[in-house]
Image (cartoon, helix red, strand yellow):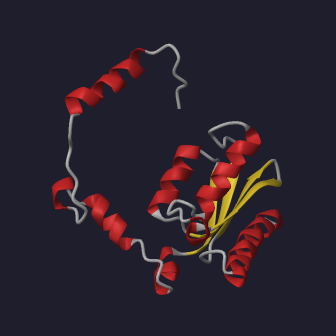
Amino acid sequence: MNEELAFMREAIRLSEENVDTGRGGPFGAVVVKDGRIIARGANSVTATNDPTAHAEVVAIRAACQALGTFQLDGCDIYTSCEPCPMCLGAIYWARPSRLFYANTKEDAAAVQFDDQFIYEEIARPVSERKLFTSQLLRDEAIGAFRKWAQSELKTEY
């Protein structure tokens, strides 16, 4: 348990450092494998003009590079805040063993990082979402899926 607390404290330290240096939002994350930190990430959305550069995504990208794989089997992710929908999706796709977080999504909303609208939008039928969304050329696009299903070159994930 002391080790887990130390890893979480590092994620929290990264979140505070990010605020102190003005590099981005108050979010930090670390990826741990075999009892050691293999990757760190801090929110860099505004510093990099990349809306996907959340701490968890930055840390996942770094960990996958360090391990030379697209999945984080046997890894744990520690993040200073409960992941947003995008980060939670990325975490599930990365397939770590465990996820730990400190602040809640309600804590984040209290300082203007509110993702509730995304949860609400996902639950709505596509035709009722606030962002205009329209399907085009499915009959053409389905060809790539058919090729994938038959491909001997694919890497399953």
Residue 13: % across, % down: 75, 75
Q: Quadrant of the N terminus?
A: bottom right
Decide which of 56, 1 is in the foreground and name it: 56
Residue 109: % across, % down: 46, 81
When the figure is inspected, residue 119 is found, relative to residue 114, above or below; the finding is: above
Residue 44 picture quarter: bottom right
Residue 121: % across, % down: 29, 63
Residue found 20% across the figure and 28% down from its top: 139
Residue lying farthest to the left in this orientation: 127
Q: In this figure, what is the number of numbered marks?
A: 0
When the figure is inspected, residue 149 is found, relative to residue 80, above or below; the finding is: above
Residue 58: % across, % down: 64, 57
Decide which of 148, 108 is in the foreground and name it: 148
Residue found 63% across the figure and 40% down from its top: 71
Residue 82 picture quarter: bottom right
When the figure is inspected, residue 9 is found, relative to residue 97, above or below; the finding is: below
Residue found 52% across the figure and 82% down from its top: 107
Decide which of 45, 127 is in the foreground and name it: 45
Q: Is residue 121 left or right of residue 52?
A: left
